[in-house]
Amino acid sequence: MRFKTTVLLLLILGIFSSCKEEVLPKPKAQLRLEYPEGDTALLQTPDYSFAYNSLAQIRDQKSSSLTLDYPSLKGAIYLTYKPVEGNLLELLSDAQKLSYEHVIKADNIMEQKYIDESGRVFGMFYEVKGDAASQAQFYATDSTRHFLTGSLYFYAKPNYDSVYPAAVYLQKDVRRILESLKWK
């Protein structure tokens, strides 16, 4: 009889102690980074002009290239200008090849055409997703005289999860450059 009472008590104790709420693991936290918008500044070269984020510092400006450096984001946008001298197909091929060199590490490369008929600016914007070295590339041309390429790079080992907020922020600046580009 004593054995049955002990089993019955343990069974009742087990039932009441198992009626607690289920323990769920906490979700992973997401880092929230916010970057200042910055004012728009205008950069003029002998061949072209464009609007850019005033938080960028212009470095290494030469006749055919320049760098927009973002020290707080540890990134930079590299721009290279080349005149079109009957070599448009070669310039286009090189720009597209440069963009697709990242396909080895990239998860996806999204192409977006850019056409501004009135300003004679025709180009392509490449958004690169994944652990590639560059998170954005573009080229623009008027198809007769001017050709400009741009690339976004970070001064860190490519880790898409870590650079994603800064990459999105700087991709907006790359688009601003492309959309405000004017040939001279």
Image: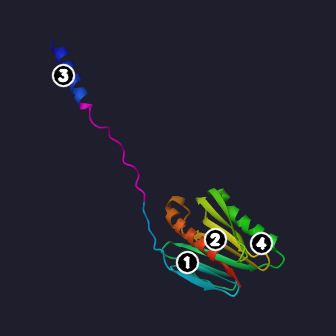
- Reading the image, the residue beneath label 3 is 9
Left or right: 44 as drawn, with respect to 162: right
Residue type at numbered disc 4: Leu
Residue 39 within the magenta-colored segment of the rendering: no
Marks 2 and 3, how far apart at CA: 73 Å
Can see residue 154?
no
Q: Which one is earlier in the sequence, the residue at label 4 or at label 1?
A: 1
Q: Earlier in the sequence, mark 1 or mark 3?
A: 3
Q: CA distance from mark 3 to mark 4?
A: 84 Å
Q: Give yes or no for contact between labels 2 and 3 (Cβ–Cβ under 8 Å).
A: no
Q: Which colour scheme appears in the figure? A: rainbow
Does 87 sit left or right of 12 as displayed?
A: right
Q: Disc 2 versus disc 1: distance between alpha carbons?
A: 12 Å
Q: Mostly what secondary structure, the magenta segment? A: loop
Residue type at mark 2 is Ser
Please give the range of residues in magenta: 17-30
Q: Which residue is mark 1?
A: 69
In this view, the mark in front (3 or 4) = 4
Residue at the far left in the pictured view = 2
Q: Which residue is mark 2?
A: 151
Looking at the picture, does residue 8 appear above or below residue 172? above
- Look at the numbered disc 4 and give the secondary structure of its residue: helix
Residue 64 quadrant: bottom right
Which residue position holds label 4?
91
What's the distance in space between the residues labelled 4 and 1, CA to CA?
Answer: 25 Å
Q: Residue furthest front?
A: 118
| Circle 2 residues within 10 Å: few <14, some 14–19, many ≥20 | many
